[in-house]
Image: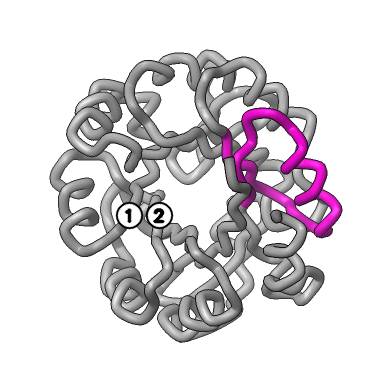
């Protein structure tokens, strides 16, 4: 399968930010125009964009819908969106607006039937976010940590028709410490679903290492792109 680079556009108060370890009080603003940022990524060759409504993740409902709509209107790139998606009404609304895939995190733990219904109605268009602290699933904007192991969470949806699992090591996110390749590969080996890596990408060599692991189909690139440590063109080349 092709290996995909997903440039991240995290939204807080209508601006493009990156958080450190998912902490809303440790946000760095990188751009005030999300649509312009989306265009820049698409023009550099990105076929997908990973958009997260951070305010929505904590509120449990969309808070940056206008910014997402502007992104959708500004670029031909496919968009997957997450953050506060916890009912069918919000899922259907995002699809009507033109989002290609929705990412369900907290609700996948608290309401697995929602994932199954959404995936049955929209095969291959639902991604389950498996966010982890110390191997356990974190929810509600990573503010809470459950007692559910990440592999158990992934296995629950193997037969549901979801597109992929999005695995984030919360302790590395936004810190440029490097992706937790070992934990990502372990999850990919434990489940029968493609896994997207996330959290801490710092160097293009990690892209090559992830690409060679069975079952890992892509990686989220955030702060490394914004800080200029990786150029998007380099990342896309490393993914080929």
In this view, the residue in front, 56 or 80, is 80
Q: Nearer the viewer, residue 214 or 79?
A: 214
Point out the tag, 2 or 1, that comes first from the N-terminus: 2
Seen at 32% across and 72% down, the residue is 72
Quarter of the view holding residue 240: bottom right
Q: Which mark is residue 175?
A: none
Tell me, yes or no, whether the highlighted magenta stretch contains residue 203. yes
Q: Which residue is mark 1?
A: 100
Element at label 2: strand
Q: Is residue 83 above or below residue 171?
A: below
Identify the residue under disc 2: 80
Asked whether residue 212 is drawn in magenta, I would say: yes
Rendering coords of residue 86 (x, y %): 27, 40
Q: Are marks 2 and 1 in contact (CB under 8 Å)?
A: yes
Q: Is residue 9 above or below residue 90?
A: below
Identify which residue is drawn at 70% across, 27% down.
Answer: 134
Residue 55 coordinates in the image, percent (x, y): 40, 59
Q: Which residues are magenta?
A: 195-219
């Amino acid at each position: 399968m092709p290996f995909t680079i997903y440039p991240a556009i995290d939204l807080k108060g209508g601006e493009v930010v990156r958080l450190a370890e998912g902490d809303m009080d440790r946000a760095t603003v990188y751009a005030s125009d999300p649509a312009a940022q989306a265009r820049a990524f698409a023009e550099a060759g990105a076929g997908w964009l990973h958009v997260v409504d951070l305010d929505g993740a904590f509120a449990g409902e969309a808070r940056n819908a206008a910014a997402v709509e502007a992104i959708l209107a500004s670029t031909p790139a496919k968009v997957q969106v997450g953050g506060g998606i916890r009912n069918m009404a919000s899922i259907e609304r995002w699809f009507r607006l033109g989002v290609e895939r929705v990412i369900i995190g907290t609700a996948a733990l608290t309401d697995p039937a929602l994932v199954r219904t959404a995936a049955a109605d929209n095969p291959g268009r639902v991604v389950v976010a498996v966010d982890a602290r110390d191997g356990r699933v974190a929810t509600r904007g990573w503010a809470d940590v459950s007692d559910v192991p990440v592999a158990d969470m992934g296995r629950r949806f193997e037969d549901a028709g979801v597109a992929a699992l999005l695995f984030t090591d919360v302790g590395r996110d936004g810190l440029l410490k490097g992706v937790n390749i070992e934990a990502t590969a372990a999850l990919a080996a434990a489940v029968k679903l493609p896994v997207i890596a996330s959290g801490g990408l710092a160097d293009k060599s990690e892209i090559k290492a992830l690409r060679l692991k069975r079952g890992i189909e892509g990686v989220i690139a955030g702060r490394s792109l914004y800080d200029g440590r990786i150029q998007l063109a380099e990342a896309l080349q490393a993914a080929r």
